[in-house]
């Protein structure tokens, strides 16, 4: 579970919390990640989840 994380980089106006290339056997839950979530910089990078991706990580995850 990832909660209450804020990306603070004043030099990067497009900053996000990067949740990239994780392999999770059960659930991946992301809540209150500010200002948002990014799947990374390289197309195709995603998280692989065995059960459910919930909250903000739902859009940056795929089934195992």
Image (tube, grey):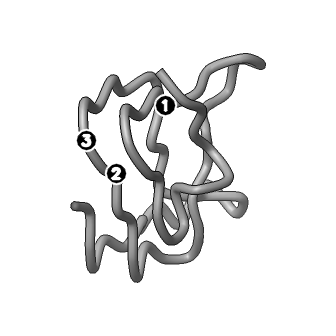
Looking at the image, residue 28 lies above or below residue 3 = above
Measure the C-alpha gap from mark 3 to mark 1: 12 Å
Label 3–label 1 contact, CB within 8 A: no
Q: In what element is the residue under mark 3?
A: loop
* Above or below, comparing residue 9 to residue 61 in the picture: below
Tell me which residue sits at (26%, 73%) in the image.
Answer: 3
Q: Is residue 54 left or right of residue 5?
A: right
| Disc assigned to residue 26 | 3
Q: In the rendering, at what x and y percent does residue 53 appear?
A: 47, 53
Name above or below for residue 29 compared with residue 60: below
Counting every numbered tag in the picture gives 3
Upstream in sequence: badge 3 or badge 1: 3
Residue 13, x across and y down, in percent: 70, 63
As drawn, the residue found furthest toward the front would be 51
- From the viewer's perspective, is the residue at label 3 or at label 1 nearer? 3
Q: Tell me the number on the disc at residue 28.
A: 2
Is 55 or 43 nearer to us in this picture? 55
Residue at x 30%, y 71% (from the top left corner): 5
Q: How much space separates mark 2 and mark 1, taking CA atoms?
A: 9 Å
Secondary structure of the residue carrying tag 1 is: strand
Q: Are marks 2 and 1 in contact (CB under 8 Å)?
A: yes
Q: Is residue 31 left or right of residue 61?
A: left
- The residue lying at 39 percent from left, 66 percent from top is 30
Tag of residue 47: 1
Q: Nearer the viewer, mark 2 or mark 3?
A: 3
């Amino acid at each position: 579970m990832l909660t209450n994380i804020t990306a603070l980089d004043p030099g990067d106006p497009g900053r996000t919390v990067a949740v990239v290339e994780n392999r999770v056997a059960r659930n991946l839950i992301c809540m209150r990640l500010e200002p948002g979530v990014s799947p990374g910089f390289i197309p195709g990078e995603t998280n692989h989840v065995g059960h459910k991706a919930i909250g903000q990580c739902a859009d940056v995850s795929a089934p195992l």
